Every structure is written in structure tokens, then in C-alpha cells.
Amino acid sequence: MRLASAKFKHLDSVQPFLLPDTVPAFRVVKQLMDISSFDGPYILRSALKNEGQKGQLLSGKSLSIGEIDSMQELNEAWEKISTQVDLAEVILQKEIKWESHITLTYEKDFFFAEIKKKNGPQQFIYWTPLAQTLHDEIQKIRNFLRPLETYLLQDKCWLMEAGILNGKIYLFQLHPLSLDLLSTIFSSEMVGQIVSSRMKFAKSQGLWGLIKTEWKARTFRHKMKDESFHPSLIFLNWEFLFHYFRIFCMLNQLGPDAQSFARFLAMSFEKTWMSSLVKKHLELANFFRKNEAFDPMNLGFESQGLIYIGKGTLEGTVGEDIHTCDTISLALIYQKNARPRVILTKEIGLLSHPVLASVENGVYLVLGMSELPKKGARIHLDFDQKVIRIE
């Protein structure tokens, strides 16, 4: 029987696009006498009238009872669920004992997810075609979403709930979502602000769109003199930083990748009309990051390789004017008297606070080193040719 409630109907519709059992097996239950066999564990899930509607999710209002392993437990669960007011639909579904739970909001070319492990804190991950959180689950989620992309064009924004077990993603919930409801869904109120202020890098953006964004960026920079700190400003600032990155790529006929962004950051060491604006947004990014109240996401790019951020050539000695490290310490960047000229690091988060703080303070960088030279080694660097020689 096809699912009809707003809460469950999309689970039924997307099954043909997904691998078998990605949506755990289910059946509609109208009366318990219809069930003749039992092979748990199951979860009995219900939907109320109007639940799952785009603008009124009524999330958490209906009952779901899991860990059902016997007919007696099923009878007890049915008694509780069937007495709900405005009951629309009930399904009995195979229960997945997930290792990680995913709450995800999706738009075309964008998703933002909160991942909760059974034993551990939640993590936030973020993906756009340009930049993404450097997290192990990113590619797994992208592969999961890819066959759904055509179906999801039906609406602008979607909410999904899923679980990961033994490396496989199982889809539990899917329905359209109003952006106004984001802050009520995730465990952090800041998620709604982050998503609504997300980075924009649309290839279809024309001249008029660029002009409008430029005016918004100018207004934003001027307002910062009086604006009190708000977490969403971190991500709104990214929108404007990437506006200038788009212009940089257009002017130089570059694709928006890690190497291009490194050139873009290196450009801030020069004295041009764009470099002064970029430095201002880097300054704001680092100012906001000092005030943020949540663990920052380690953002970067796919397929980075070795990344050089600097101009021209220079020589130096490890332990003197060249510093080596696995990850960059902010304390090192903000000390004025002993700040290194160059940092060689294994770090790859091009959009991380330490990397941007280094660029803002004129420190040259080589990112993505697999091995670090030893103290006392003499280093020759050519940032234009992207060459490093170690003696």
C-alpha cells in the first residue's frame, strides 16, 4: 500500500532511486490482525494530520515506539499510538540500530548536516560545489544524495533524517522544509542562521547579480563598525569573500578550486583595488572567529595537493624564520615580535581560522606537506613556480 501522509509519502516515492533497503522495509498498519508474522526489531511510527507539511512540521508531536521484538510489545505500542488525536497513518518499519544519526537540510548544490554519534558530541558538516567541511562522511553523504537530485528539484529546501550503520546510510525521513523552521530542528539555534547566511557561488550569476552583491558587501563592511557580534555574521562574511573570489576567477579565467583560492589569497599581499577589500573581509573573518561559541568547521576544497600561498621567492631556515607544524597555532600568528615569515604545515583547511589569520598577517604558507623538514634545514621557496627545495 502506498504511503499517503505528508510525513511519509516521500519515503515511498524515492525508493526506486535508491539501493534496496536504503529506506528500511515498512508496511502500513490499519489493524493488528493484518500482521501474521513477526521478525523484529521494528519501530512503529505514526503521522498526524498536517504533520510533515512544509511550513508546519509539527515535529515530535506524533509517537514513534521502537525496540519492538514481540507481538506483545507490538500490541502495547499499538494501543498508545492508535489513540492519538488526528492520527493520519501508521507504519511498521524495520528498525536500524544506527551508529550515527544525521539531520540534514538540502538545497540544490548545498547541504548542511548535523551528525550525532551514540557516544560523542554532535558535529556539523557543510558542502557546496566550491568548498566543504573536511570530514570523513562528506563523500558518503554526497554519494547517497546523488541519485535523489532530480527528485529533490520538486522543492527548494528539504529536511532529511538518516542513520549510518556499518558504513551504509539508511533514510528515515524526507519532506520539504520552510527555511523559517530551521532553528527549531537542529540542536543549535545557530544552524538556521548559518544556513540562511551560507556561501553563494552560482555560475549563473550575471552582471546585475554581481553588482547587487558588491553593494551588499560594501554596506556590510561599513555596518561592521557599529554591528554587535552575531554568529551568522561569520557565514555572511564568507558570502562576500567568495563574491570577490568569483570576480578573481572571472578576471583570470580560472576554475573555482583550491589552487585558484590559494592564488586569490596570495593576491591580498599585493596592493590592488581588490586586495584591500579582500584583506578587510579576512580581517572580519578572523575577528568573528575569535568570538564564535561553537567548534569551527574545518573547511576546504577537494583534491588540493600541495598549496602555496605567497609571492615571489625567498630563503630561510627551519626554526628561525621558517616554522613547521602539523596544524597552525593561532598563538603563533598573533605574536607580533616572533611571527615566522613562512609556515610549512600538514594542515589542509584553506578556509580555517589559522590559515586566514596567517594570510591577514602577511605570513606565507605551504599547506598539505606530507613530511616536514627538520630543524636547521635550509629552505628555498618559489611561490610563483610552486617549488620547494630543502637542503
Image (cartoon, rainbow, N blue to C red):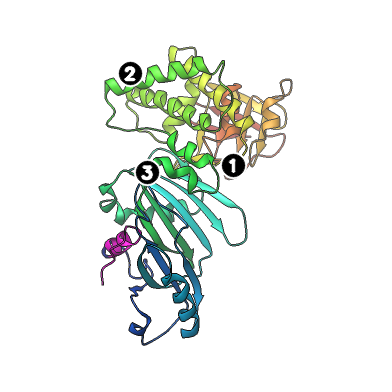
> Circle 3: is it few (<14), some (14-19), or many (20+) Cα within 10 Å?
some
Circle 2: residue type: Ile
Circle 1: residue type: Lys
Q: Which residue is pictured at 36% across the width and 56% down the height?
A: 174
- Say if the magenta span includes residue 339: no
Mark nearer the viewer, 3 or 2: 3
Residue 37 in the image: state x and y as whole percent. 38, 87
Q: Which residues are magenta?
A: 1-15
Q: Which residue is pictured at 44% across the width and 60% down the height?
A: 162
Q: Which residue is mark 3?
A: 178
Gap between marks 1 and 2, in whole Å?
38 Å
Gap between marks 3 and 2, in whole Å?
28 Å
Q: Which residue is mark 1?
A: 346
Query: What is the quadrant of the C terminus in the image?
Result: top right
Q: Which residue is pictured at 62% across the width and 61% down the height?
A: 119
Q: Which mark is residue 211?
A: 2
